[in-house]
């Protein structure tokens, strides 16, 4: 099958979260199953720099709306995945975060930037395309490409089937009514069964409404978003489309995230040589200026500093965690208020707490390997990747029972399958109790080794997920 991945992120070049990781790894897993998968992504500076010799193969032109005619270039990723780069520097030649300006606010022309990406995706899946490769499936990812399904539905010549994957329902791509004309959509699209959402044009709703099938990134999240409590205003539509909605659990890149070969670590290790993990803890303590002690559990966090991720709950109980006693390492960025509060906590407890604001891929690897326990107290979590990294690195996670966390982490009270610690209510008290259970278990070497080895034995590769997506593609085409 010929599949076009349309995405606004792709690791390692552009990544703000799990979407980038998925777009960077899933196409290769599908290609390993002999499917012809190509990835459509904006030619951001990092991609333009990596592929300076990319050849222009087309220049799509539109008959309506205000979208420009970009260049379409082709390149090949190091793993062999063909790339199609939407080249329009005025939209995509901006450094830093792909969605936000220097002040941390959305770019005012995001509807045009990602409308263009969606429009090119639909053009490739239509009879208008001048490219000699045409996809059977246009696989759209998150709101930034949701409009591709609407273009395929409303504009003439659309013949590819469309699949829309929701990585996070909270981000909905809302813009004013005037955007309808700018984006070249017909007036007929502006209704309750189209792209209109409470007076706004919603890229997310466009995908949910018009895609031939919908997936999200874990089975539990697929159920949760059909409830009014977790549906972010889209629950009714999702219940209406329940027969077309499925949850496929994300995998991880097991070559990049492998403690036995990880180039970022002080000492590589495996489930059979777990004693070598201790060298990474000592190295991490030294790197971040913590007191070098092997008799205290080291708690690790790699996360956006937001309420969604429960980092406000963790901040509330952090002083009590440090009194257990324990040490705490946090890497991430997000809310300015939370950033300042976390930095203040680290300044007050320099020997026990280290906070690094920003993102550092290599440091993220070292935290996964060096921490004893990983914390993910998310209020909601569509899939989550860090708990999968933690399991693979023998760092049992503490998670809230939501979304993909509930699908992958089994509480230690299960004597046969337990690989971590799970709590229910999104409260500081429940989080504190779960971490306390984890630190007590850490002091039992026999129990702890069992938890570590069960987690490391879990198959988190993309092979299973790729098989499920291939089955869904086949179902759409048949």
Image: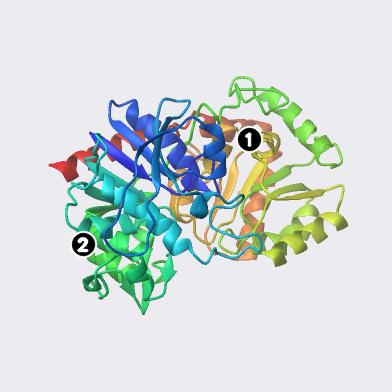
Residue 416 at what x, y percent from top left?
A: 47, 36
Mark 1 and mark 2 in contact (Cβ < 8 Å)?
A: no
Task: Give how far across and how far down residue 371 sits, in percent.
Answer: 69, 39
Which quarter of the figure has residue 266?
top right
Residue 177, position as x, y percentages in the image: 37, 76
Give the structural element (helix, strand or loop) at label 2: helix
Q: Quadrant of the N terminus?
A: top left
User: Helix, strand or loop at disc 1?
Assistant: helix
Q: Is residue 68 visible?
A: yes
Residue corresponding to mark 1? 448
* Residue 170 in view of the camera: no
- Front of the two marks 2 and 1: 2
Residue of label 2: 154
Label 1 crowd (10 A; few <14 / some 14-19 / many >=20): many
User: Residue shown at 36%/79% (left/top)?
Assistant: 199
Looking at this view, is 53 or 204 the one in front?
53
Q: Residue at x 42, y 69 (%)?
A: 174
Image quadrant in which the C terminus is located? top left
Task: Compute the Cα span from label 2 to label 1.
Answer: 56 Å
């Amino acid at each position: 099958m010929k599949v076009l991945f349309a995405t606004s992120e792709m690791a390692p070049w552009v990544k703000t979260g799990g979407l980038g990781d998925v777009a960077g790894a899933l196409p290769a897993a599908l290609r390993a199953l002999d499917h012809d998968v190509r990835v459509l992504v904006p030619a951001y500076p990092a991609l333009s720099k990596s592929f300076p010799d990319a050849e222009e193969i087309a220049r799509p032109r539109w008959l309506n709306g205000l979208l420009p005619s970009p260049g379409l270039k082709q390149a090949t990723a190091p793993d062999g995945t063909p790339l199609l780069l939407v080249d329009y520097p005025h939209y995509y030649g901006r450094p830093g975060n792909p969605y936000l300006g220097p002040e941390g606010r959305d770019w005012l022309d995001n509807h045009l930037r990602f409308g263009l990406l969606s429009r090119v995706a639909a053009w490739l899946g239509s009879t208008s395309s001048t490219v000699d490769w045409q996809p059977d499936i246009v696989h759209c990812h998150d709101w930034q490409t949701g409009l591709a399904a609407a273009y395929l539905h409303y504009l003439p010549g659309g013949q590819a089937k469309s699949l829309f994957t929701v990585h996070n329902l909270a981000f909905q791509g809302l813009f004013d009514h005037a955007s309808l004309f700018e984006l070249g959509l017909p007036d007929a699209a502006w209704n309750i069964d189209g792209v209109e959402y409470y007076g706004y044009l919603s890229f997310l709703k466009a995908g949910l409404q018009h895609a031939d099938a919908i997936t999200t990134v874990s089975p539990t999240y697929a159920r949760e978003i059909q409830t009014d409590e977790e549906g972010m205003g889209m629950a009714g539509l999702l219940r209406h489309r329940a027969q077309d909605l499925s949850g496929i659990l994300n995998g991880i890149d097991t070559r990049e995230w492998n403690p036995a070969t990880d180039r970022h670590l002080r000492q590589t290790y495996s489930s059979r040589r777990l004693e070598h993990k201790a060298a990474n803890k000592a190295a991490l303590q030294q790197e971040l200026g913590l007191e070098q002690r092997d008799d205290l559990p080291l708690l690790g966090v790699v996360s956006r500093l937001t309420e969604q991720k429960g980092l406000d709950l963790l901040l509330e109980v952090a002083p009590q965690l440090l009194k257990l006693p324990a040490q705490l390492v946090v890497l991430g960025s997000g809310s300015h208020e939370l950033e300042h509060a976390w930095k203040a906590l680290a300044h007050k407890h320099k020997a026990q707490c280290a906070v690094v604001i920003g993102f550092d891929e290599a440091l993220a690897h070292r935290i996964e390997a060096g921490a004893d326990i990983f914390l993910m107290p998310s209020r909601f979590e569509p899939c989550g990747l860090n708990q999968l990294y933690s399991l693979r690195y023998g760092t049992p996670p503490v998670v809230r029972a939501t979304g993909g966390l509930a699908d992958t982490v089994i509480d230690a009270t299960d004597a046969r399958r337990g690989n971590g610690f799970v709590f229910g209510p999104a409260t500081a008290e429940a989080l504190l109790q779960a971490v306390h259970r984890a630190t007590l278990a850490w002091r039992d070497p026999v129990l702890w080794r069992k938890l570590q080895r069960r987690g490391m034995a879990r198959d988190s590769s993309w092979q299973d997920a790729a098989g499920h997506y291939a089955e869904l593609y086949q179902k759409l085409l048949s």
